[in-house]
Amino acid sequence: MSKTSTIKSRASGKATLASVAARAGVSAMTASRALNQPKRVSDAVRARVGLAVAELGYVPNRAARALASAQSNVIVVLVPSLSNAVFTAVLEGIEDAIGSGNYQLLIGNTRYSDAEEEKLLGIYLQSNPDGILLSSLSQSARVTRMLAASNVPLVSMMDLGSAPGQLSVGFSQFDAGRAMTRYLIDKGHTRIGFIGAQLDERTLRRADGYRKAMGEAGLLDARLELMVGEPSTIALGAQLVERMLAQAPDCDAVFCCNDDLAHGAIYHCQRRGIKVPEQLAVCGFNDLPASAWMTPSVTTIATPRYRIGFEAASLLLAVIKGEAPPAAQIDLGFTLMARESA
């Protein structure tokens, strides 16, 4: 039997802090300090402990460390998609805000599913996280109970909360939907359709803003709404604009809840010889990179996705440190990008 195997835990076969200390020739307390408070030990001790860790393949027990320090240095982040460019930008902002500190991110993909969110949160809460970032304002009843029982600091992203004490960073999805619809009305359009997919809470709030503007102008018509629960794609955008024009042939503009739907709508119009924007104005939401380079370029709502992630993570870190938040809501706003398609 090799020397390495004899100083590993007999019960599990895994290297332990005690085995690292034995290999380095120091006490377990000194080994712990070298790993967790390296400035409190000499360079020589730190080097010996580091070498022992490398030789034994030691992985610190995060759960034990959390119990000892009341901190896990873990932040949970739940987003509905890891492939959607909207949320990859948010994650980039979060990672940059966390920086080179001691925090580790546990990132979960809920796939727009309450059941998946419940499962992931149940697993991640076992790591005793120091904070949680969620990409939604509302959760299922079970998740709400889990969050309340955990008493872990929480910041919601992408929209603005209104509940007392609810910390949120984003912009008003309702106001953005209303602003885009108002823009189309001001351009002289009277038969404005709304095309929605996925039907997550952000899309539904944009739809509410659309209805508000249409109602204020006396233009509200249920035949001009087309909402499906399928994931938003370019292909779906082409299909839905065809359905919209079939159920409302006099439709003169469409507000797509996402840019990929708007791209598909424009491609469909080009195939069918429908001039954009002369015969049908098309606009989107989120200002994806391709939207400025489409022909015609897409009128859309630019959203500060990276900044949302960065500011939300920064706010959470401040709360974890015990600092009073500057505000419960941080409104980063949105920008209407008027381009060629509408």
Image (cartoon, grey):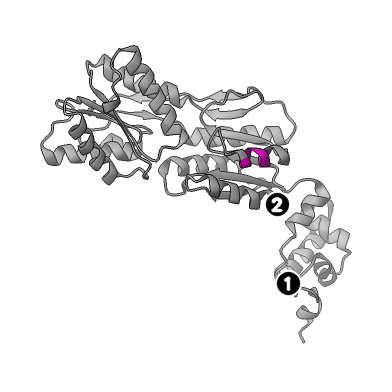
Residue at left 10%, top 36%? 273
Q: What type of secondary structure mainly makes up the magenta span?
A: helix
Residue at left 77%, top 87%? 1
Farthest residue toward the left? 273
Residue 64 included in the magenta stretch of the image: no
Mark 1 residue type? Leu
Give the mark toward the camera: 1 or 2: 2
Number of numbered callouts drawn: 2
Report whether 10 appears left or right of 220.
Answer: right
| Residue position marked by numbered label 2 in the rendering | 126
Image quadrant in which the C terminus is located: top left
Q: Earlier in the sequence, mark 1 or mark 2?
A: 1
Report whether 4 appears left or right of 85.
Answer: right
Judging depth in this view, the residue of 126 and 32 nearest the camera is 126
| Residue position marked by numbered label 1 in the rendering | 56
Q: Dividing the picture into quarters, in which one does residue 318 lie?
A: top right
Expressed as whole percent of the image width and height from the top left, the position of residue 306 reads: 48, 36
Question: Is disc 2 placed on a helix, strand or loop?
Answer: helix
Q: Can residue 106 be seen from the camera position used here?
A: no
* Highlighted magenta segment, given as a residue range: 142-147
